[in-house]
Amino acid sequence: MRVIIMLRPTNERGTKTAYTKFRKRLASEGFTLLQPEVFIRAVTRKRTATRLIDRISEEVPNTGAIWAFTLTEKQYAESRYLCGGPGYQEQMVGSKTQVVL
């Protein structure tokens, strides 16, 4: 089972420090950054996920919005990574990870 936390901070005064503190809390709980403002963690049971979300909800910043939801492994396995075509750099150099000059 996966727990996903999505953040949407605002530009109000004091928000930056509150969200920085919240992100550090997520990192200390074992979450990894999936995308900007999207964190994910694998857990073994639904009960563990519920307790984890309850612990995190105690330190939610006052502004902005935070979504927390769970996905089963089957649902997560069916997710797809979508991206556009290769960028300019990949077209010119290729998909090699190392270029010898």
Image (cartoon, rainbow, N blue to C red):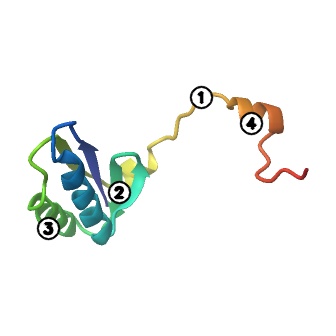
Q: In the structure shown, which secondary structural element does the residue marked by tag 3 occupy?
A: helix
Q: Position of residue 46 (x, y in %)?
A: 20, 64
Q: Where is residue 68 in the image (x, y as percent from the top left)?
A: 21, 50
The quadrant in which residue 64 appears is: top left
Between disc 1 and disc 2, whose residue precedes?
A: 2
Q: Looking at the image, which residue is at 59% across and 28% down?
A: 84
Between disc 4 and disc 1, whose residue precedes?
A: 1
Pair 4/1: label in front? 4
Q: In this view, does 72 lie to the left or right of 85?
A: left
Between disc 4 and disc 3, whose residue precedes?
A: 3
Task: Give the vertical position of 9 relative to 43 (above or below).
Answer: above
Q: Name the residue under label 2.
A: 40
Q: In this view, does 24 lie to the left or right of 50?
A: right
Residue type marked 1: Gly
Residue 67 visible at all? no
Q: What's the CA distance linking mark 4 and mark 1?
A: 12 Å
Q: Where is residue 23 in the image (x, y as percent from the top left)?
A: 28, 58
Q: What's the CA distance linking mark 2 and mark 3?
A: 15 Å
Q: What's the CA distance linking mark 2 and mark 4?
A: 29 Å
